[in-house]
Structures are given as structure tokens and as C-alpha cells.
Amino acid sequence: MKPSLVFTLVLLCSLSVGKTHADDDSRPPNFVFIIADDCTFRDIGCYGGQAHTPNIDALATEGMRLTECYQAAPMCSPTRHNIYTGLYPVRSGAYPNHTFAKDGTKSIAHYLAPLDYRVALSGKTHIGPKEVFPFEYSGKKNPDMDAVDGLFSECAKARTPFCLLACSNEPHSPWNKGDSSRYPVDEIELPPYLVDTPVVRENFARYLAEITYFDDQVGQILERLERHGLTENTVVMVVSEQGNSFPFAKWTCYSSGLQSAMVVRWPGKIQAGSTSDAMVEYVDITPTFIEAAGLPAQENLDGKSFLPVLRGEAKQHKTHSYGLMTTRGIIAGSDLFAIRTVRDDRYRLIWNLNHDATFTNACTEADYFRSMQRFANSGDANAKELVDRYMHRPEYELFDCQADPLEMNNLAQDPAHAEHVERLKSTLLAWMEEQGDEGVKTERDAILHQSRYKKFDSAEAFKVYRRAVRNRKKNPID
């Protein structure tokens, strides 16, 4: 072969390879969003927890671990609507549990449509209606790994971008998955806001085992990404959702209920092994994916893209995070115990709008809480203080989250902190007004935003709800 011909062939091959690489760089990234269910963030290994989580820990060494991530509601259904729509719960209408979004609301599927993304959800749903969330659905309570593998395979072959929402049901109670023998009950450490009883210890060990079970699900998904050659062009985000269903976590607006783990990997875009203490919220996830895909920002969203934080271009994102808890309509929930909260870089203010009521939920009927009550009734002063503090709240609670990260020392009545209470209450009220949150009235109307009452008109819905409450009082759960 003549030298000139060889040179020409080499040049053509080089141009072809270069074009392929350019195409890879210009293609929008894939997204894999993996969410746990009722997992307190500080129990995960890379957040200093006892749970064995090798896959999440390894992911943190390959990407960024965010330390100040918060959600807007400490329950599953409003949280998932919040994530997928980029809207706070009251504005979307999805603020109680077992809820649904207002007609006409858009979700991540609509925003990624211009780039022909396949948007799939595998596992737990807890969202509605389907018109708002036109996803490809698979699995039931946990991701269907065969469906996930099929999605990856088809998209790799067709060079089609995808957004996978892999939604686990773990470690939601009952804690019956994973190997609890890894966590001997006499060796685990309990947080100081739990009473140390044998029943609490047994349940907590099984809860930790189920976190490890969730971590294995994360590993299975990451392995399938690698198998199909998709790792390099895929943003992987793992979050822990609201806290566990022990006291002072899920169903509350304390940090153990609203703060979340968030680990994000994007090879070549996010520095491996990095950490950020920028304040971000779940409502920011959809806007972040929109920007990462190369699409224009949507001004109608409550969230704001934190892509500059992930890329290491910014150290700050938000100055405040917000949250609310609606007890009306939840299992064993006290009626109209509305909770609102705001957190800045140091202080958290909690406003219990109906503080004269007794705070109850499924937790207060669980065997572990009843074991705490037995200790309290037997004369244990610490148990009595914790049980009383969980079920009976003052109107305002203020915590110095730097000095008191577990939020156990209420400063609201301290005159030295009066300025923080007033300042944060003003900020909270402004947010509520912006969202159309009328406090107690919004709480009272919560049942109108629950799927079980959707078929009734307003008057009939209230009648059906009151009848259900009366029947429950006559036949309490054992």
C-alpha cells in the first residue's frame, strides 16, 4: 500500500474516532435517581452511621457528598411529589400523605420531553395522577432489576437518554429484610432521643440491617450501569428520604425527619471524593436535572438548580430551607396538629400551630414507643421526659443546630434568642404566604388533597372523614 494511502486512511480513522468522542460529549447525560424509604441520613456509613453501606460509601468517594440537604415534608407521598415536580407541597396541592398533585402540574417527564428522554420509575410510586407523572412504570414496592437492566440495554443500543427513578421501599417498617445478625442488639448505639429498651434495640438492629439491604440495591443498579457502558455519561444521585419511623424523625419537622443524605456522581464533571455543605433542598432536584440536560430553566418552579455546587463552581446555594408536617388524615394522626419550620445556616424554628393537641401518629402505636411509655410509667425520669416531649409540644421550638445537631435543647423561651425566633418566624410567614399556606385552614382542608377522598365533594369528604375518626376512637388500633 502506498504511504500516501496509509496516511489518508489513518487520518480518516482519526477523524471518525474524534467525531464519536465529540458526539459522546454533546449527548445529554442520563440520570439515575435512587431513593430510600424512611432512612435517617446519619445512620448511613459515609455520614458517620453504624449501617454497613459499602456501595453508597464507594459512590461518595467517586463523587460528591452533600451535608446540608433537606426535604419539605417528612412523609413519603408529599416528598416524592416535591422531588418530581420541583414544587413545594402546598403549591402543588400534594401536602398530606397519600396525596395527589393538582391537575395541570408538570413533572420531570414533561421537562425532559424536548430531548426525547425515556423517564422511568421502578419501585415505590406513592404519586398521582398518572397524567402528571407519565413515566414508564415497573416493579411494585422495590425496583425491578430486570426492568432496569432492560432500560439500560435498550437505551445504550439506541443511544437514547434516560432518567431512571429507582424507588426502594427500604428501610421502611416492618424491618424484615437483610441480615440483622450483623448488628448485635447489645452492641448497637442508640441516639439519645430514644429510650434504651430491649424492644427499641431489637427494632433498631433490624432497621440497620434493612439499610444494608437498600445499599445492596444501589450496588445492583450501579453494576448494571457499568455492564452496559453507561457509567461515564450518567449522573447518579442517591438520597435517603425522610428519617426512620422511630420518635423525633419521620412525621416530625426536626432535622432527623427533614434532613437527607445526598451523594452524587458524574464522572469528569463532579470532583471525586468532594464534600459540600451548601444548603440544597429536594425541590431543587428537578431544576438541576433540567439544567444538566442542557435545557432552559423553568421560571415557574419553586426549586433552583444547584449544578454550580456539583461542579465545584459555587460553595453556597440557599440561605433557608422550609418544611411542613400535616397530621390530618395520616394513620393514627392527631387531628389538625399542623407543623411548619424554617432553617437557616445555624438555627431551626419550629411552629406547632395546634400545640395544645396531643401529637400522635403510627409511631405512638408501635411496640417500640409503647416500650418507652412503659419505662416512663415505671418512674424512669429520662423516659418520661422524652415521651412527654414527643407527644406534647410548645408553640415554638428553636434549636442551635451547630451546637445541638440532634435538636434536643429548645431555646425558644430564652430571652437571649428572642431575636432569632422573630426573625425566622417572619421568614417562615413570608414563605407560607407565597405558597398559599393558610396554616390551620390548610391543615383542615388536607383531606381534600388525599386520594381516598378525591371522589367526594367537599362537604361529603368532611362527613366521611369525621365518621372515620369516630370509628377509630371506638376501635383503637391494638
Image (tube, rainbow, N blue to C red):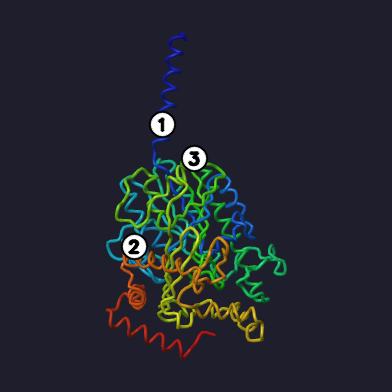
Alpha carbons under labels 1 and 2: distance apart: 37 Å
Counting residues from the N terminus, which is met first, the one under dot 1 or under dot 2? 1
Counting residues from the N terminus, which is met first, the one under dot 2 or under dot 3? 2
Residue 183 point in image, percent of width and height: 68, 64
Residue 341 point in image, percent of width and height: 44, 68
- Three-letter amino acid code at disc 3? Glu
- Residue under numbered circle 1: 22
Front: mark 2 or 3: 3
Q: Quadrant of the C terminus?
A: bottom right
Residue 81 point in image, percent of width and height: 39, 62
- Residue under numbered circle 2: 130
Residue 450 point in image, percent of width and height: 36, 73
Task: Answer whether residue 51 is visible to the viewer in this image.
Answer: yes
Q: Nearer the viewer, residue 75 or 308?
A: 308
- Three-letter amino acid code at disc 2? Lys
- Residue under numbered circle 3: 232
